[in-house]
């Protein structure tokens, strides 16, 4: 629990000035109450101390667009935090604070988590103060949720409410196994379906951000589509394993390698592609500038193509907001 911190962010919010405020007669009747005055908007979240050097893991959406970031430790200390870097595509961010005797969390092994394992969620829900809730692992490897670009969530029924974002999901021994990120809710509160980013993914992103300030991923410039049973039959595929190349960016890495719309991508460097999500993860793990082998089925024949991997473009502001 001492490793989990409360995060307070704030920024200036200015309402747009109404044109009638420029009319002296209008202002005479309504006075200064309609003046365009700056306002401060604040929000709450949670974070996890992951190193004695002062590094803190949290969610990107917790600190997005924040001008000031303050953290409160479990021992009552309050410190100003600096943003090291963020990765909107996994909704992770790394902060850093200067402080002594910072209690770093102990990392667990998310890969060994199984459905039914007991987990605890620690955070600051609704700003009431540090809170611990208990539940079990409901599912692992959750994807296709439309929450992040790269998804591999741990699902839990431990109560996660607004303010818990960026907090810790720990096993029964107190080891960090995930960063609480999102909930499914119709009311805004917990309904027993919460999602946490596994610590293995969080550490990969964190290490890159600490070293270079951002995350670099591979990219080949294709648009993919899930291979349904109907599509598999029309392409004379024996199963739905793989993903359909629906579009190819002109002069992109895949185009230069000879990939064509209608191809079925079944492997990347001999690692099997099961669906569009696995394909995205396999390509993202490739080093830009390096060569990779793509296993493709075209017109019922298996072929292999060499592609020079590009660098994945940064997500647009619109995509970040979505």
Image (cartoon, rainbow, N blue to C red):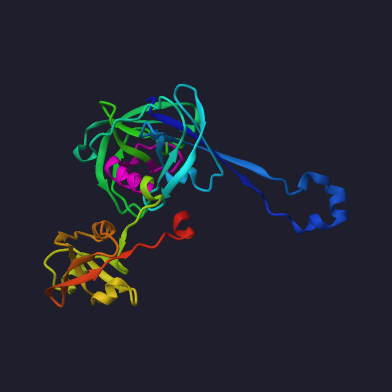
In-image side of 312 versus 305 (left or right): right
Q: Is residue 236 magenta?
A: no
Q: Quadrant of the N terminus?
A: top left
Residue 282 screen position, x and y as percent: 24, 58
* Residue 46 visible within the image: yes
Q: Quadrant of residue 193?
A: top left
User: Left or right: where does residue 315 sit relative to residue 110?
Assistant: right
Q: Position of residue 36 (x, y in %)?
A: 73, 49
Number of numbered markers: 0
Query: Measuring 42% from the left and 39% from the top, which residue is drawn there?
Result: 165
Q: Residue at x 36, y 28 (%)?
A: 133
Please tell me whether residue 197 belongs to the stretch shown in magenta.
Answer: yes
Q: In the displayed orientation, state which residue is furthest to the top.
A: 75
Question: Residue 228 placed where, x, y %?
Answer: 22, 65
What residue is shown at x 34% (from left), y 74% (from top)?
A: 249
State which quadrant residue 199 falls in: top left
Position of the C terminus by quadrant: bottom left
Question: Is 97 above or below relative to 305?
Answer: above
Q: Residue at x 49, y 43 (%)?
A: 63
Residue 285 sits above or below residue 30 on the image: below
Q: Is residue 320 above or below residue 193?
A: below
Magenta-highlighted residues: 181-209
Side (left or right) of 100 relative to 228: right
Q: Nearer the viewer, residue 320 or 108?
A: 108
What is the x, y in percent for residue 135?
30, 31
Res. 261 in view: no
């Amino acid at each position: 629990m001492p490793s989990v911190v409360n995060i307070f962010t704030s920024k200036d919010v200015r309402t747009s000035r109404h044109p009638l405020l420029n009319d002296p007669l209008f202002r005479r009747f309504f006075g200064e109450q309609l003046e365009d005055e700056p306002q401060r908007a604040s929000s709450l979240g949670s974070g996890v101390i992951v190193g004695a050097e002062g590094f803190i893991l949290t969610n990107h959406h917790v600190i997005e667009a924040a001008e000031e970031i303050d953290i409160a430790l479990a021992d009552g200390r309050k410190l100003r935090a600096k943003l090291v870097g963020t990765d909107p595509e996994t909704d992770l961010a790394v902060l850093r604070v200067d402080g002594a005797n910072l209690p770093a969390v102990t990392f667990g092994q998310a890969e060994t988590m199984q459905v039914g394992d007991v987990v605890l969620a620690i955070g600051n829900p609704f700003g009431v103060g540090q809170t611990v809730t208990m539940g079990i692992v409901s599912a692992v490897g959750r994807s296709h949720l439309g929450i992040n670009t790269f998804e591999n969530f741990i699902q839990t029924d431990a109560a996660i409410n607004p303010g818990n974002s960026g907090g810790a999901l720990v096993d029964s021994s107190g080891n960090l196994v995930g960063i609480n990120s999102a909930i499914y809710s119709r009311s805004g509160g917990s309904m027993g379906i919460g999602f946490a980013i596994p610590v293995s993914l969080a550490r990969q992103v964190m290490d890159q951000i600490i070293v270079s300030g951002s995350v670099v991923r591979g990219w080949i410039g294709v648009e993919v589509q899930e291979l349904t049973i109907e599509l598999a039959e029309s392409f004379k595929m024996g199963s739905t394993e793989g993903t359909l190349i629906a579009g190819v960016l002109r002069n992109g890495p895949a185009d230069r390698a000879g990939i064509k719309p209608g191809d079925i991508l079944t492997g990347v460097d001999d690692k099997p592609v099961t669906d569009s999500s696995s394909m995205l993860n396999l390509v993202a793990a490739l080093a830009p500038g390096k060569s990779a082998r793509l296993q493709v089925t075209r017109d019922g024949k298996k072929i292999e193509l060499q592609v020079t991997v590009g660098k994945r473009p940064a997500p647009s502001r619109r995509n970040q907001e979505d």
